[in-house]
Image (cartoon, rainbow, N blue to C red):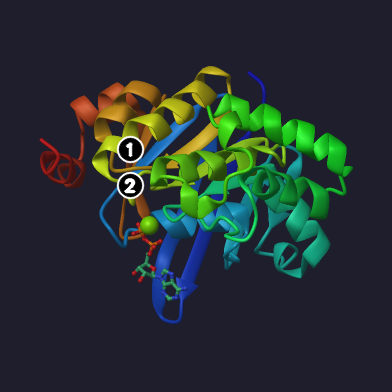
């Protein structure tokens, strides 16, 4: 067995007195899709943000691909801005709110990271951006501005933008929660295609049926701890813990 793509050991995070992540350990193998579910406030976003280092963990270790950081020794907290930016590029993040640059066209939004963070020449970044826009079905919107796009289209641009940095993993934080119901499917279809292409992903989602279909593994979090994890079919259809059962009962 090759080493997991993502390995987290004993991760902890507190805000003031409030312990938000308690001793979290998890592994995601290369090409696996992990769905993270759990009630609001359980620490799902904080965990994704810690993996991307948008939030600095207080303790524990994170390894993504070849990059490993030890927060017990303070090594991770001493990372320089430049290293942080290059690390963040390897962990592409997609948020509930798309955060596209409103003054840039679709293709400019997708090119921006490679050009500014990775110093990719503009012509090459443009070609890559067009390839990615084609992949998310939006090549014909390359020159449109974000306010001309639907929510589903904006989110697909946001996915292309994250992919443009050639991440080794993708992290989705409720990527479809802000969308009108009729626009959810087109975004889930893009995520599913990425899964089929072998992208390693962690999805925080309330789309339980989608998690059941696409995820290899499901993690149920509550109050900053992993209460239960296992194969998607097992955790969703046959949860072992009472807390998981009562959470999932809301979706039936
Ligand atoms: P989830 O994504 O599962 O809803 P979050 O990770 O967003 O949960 O939040 C977990 C807990 O951490 C919540 O109680 C939230 O209020 C708190 N929290 C998150 N971010 C901050 C912050 N920047 N400052 C203080 N508290 C925070
Ligand atoms: Mg959240």
Q: Residues within 10 Å of mark 1 (few under 14, many from 20)?
A: some
**Residue at 63% from the left image edge and 18% from the top image edge:** 1
Q: Quadrant of residue 5?
A: top right
Q: Residues within 10 Å of mark 2 (few under 14, many from 20)?
A: some
How many marks can you see?
Answer: 2
Residue 56: x %, y % from top left: 60, 66
The answer to whether residue 52 is left or right of residue 203 is right
Q: Quadrant of residue 164?
A: top right
- Whether residue 98 is situated above or below residue 121 in the rendered picture: below
From the image, which quarter does the C terminus lie in?
Answer: top left
The answer to whether residue 161 is left or right of residue 171 is right
Helix, strand or loop at mark 1: helix
* Residue that mark 1 sits on: 183
**Residue at 60% from the left image edge and 41% from the top image edge:** 7
* Residue that mark 2 sits on: 179
Helix, strand or loop at mark 2: loop
The answer to whether residue 17 is left or right of residue 232 is right
**Residue at 27% from the left image edge and 30% from the top image edge:** 235
- Whether residue 94 is situated above or below residue 230 in the rendered picture: below
- Whether residue 118 is situated above or below residue 230 in the rendered picture: below
Q: Quadrant of ligand 2?
A: bottom left
Q: Residue placed farthest to the bottom in the image? A: 16
**Residue at 21% from the left image edge and 34% from the top image edge:** 240
Q: Which disc number belongs to residue 91?
A: none
- Whether residue 236 is situated above or below residue 198 in the rendered picture: below
Please report contact status of discs 1 and 2: CB closer than 8 Å, yes or no: yes
Depth check: 55 or 140 in front?
A: 140
**What is the distance, in whole Å, between disc 1 and disc 2 at their CAs?**
6 Å
């Amino acid at each position: 067995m090759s080493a997991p793509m993502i390995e987290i050991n004993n991760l902890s995070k507190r805000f003031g007195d409030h312990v938000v992540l308690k001793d979290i350990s998890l592994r995601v193998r290369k090409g696996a899709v992990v769905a993270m579910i759990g009630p609001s406030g359980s620490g799902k976003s904080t965990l994704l943000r810690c993996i991307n280092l948008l939030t600095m963990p207080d303790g524990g270790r994170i390894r993504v691909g070849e990059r490993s950081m030890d927060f017990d020794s303070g090594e991770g907290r001493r990372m320089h801005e430049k290293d942080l930016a290059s690390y963040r590029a390897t962990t592409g993040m997609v948020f509930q709110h798309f955060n596209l640059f409103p003054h840039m066209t679709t293709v400019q939004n997708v090119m921006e990271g490679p050009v500014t963070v990775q110093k990719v020449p503009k012509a090459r970044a443009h070609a890559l951006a067009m390839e990615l826009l084609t992949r998310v079905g939006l090549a014909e919107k390359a020159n449109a501005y974000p306010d001309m796009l639907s929510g589903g289209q904006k989110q697909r641009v946001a996915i292309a933008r994250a992919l443009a940095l050639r991440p080794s993993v993708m992290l989705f934080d409720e990527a479809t929660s802000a969308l009108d119901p009729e626009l959810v499917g087109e975004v889930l279809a893009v995520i599913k295609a990425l899964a089929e292409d072998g992208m390693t992903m962690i999805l925080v989602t309330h789309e339980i049926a989608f998690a059941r279909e696409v995820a290899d593994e499901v993690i149920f979090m509550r109050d900053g701890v992993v209460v239960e994890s296992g194969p998607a079919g097992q955790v969703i259809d046959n949860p072992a813990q009472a807390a998981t059962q009562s959470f999932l009962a809301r979706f039936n």
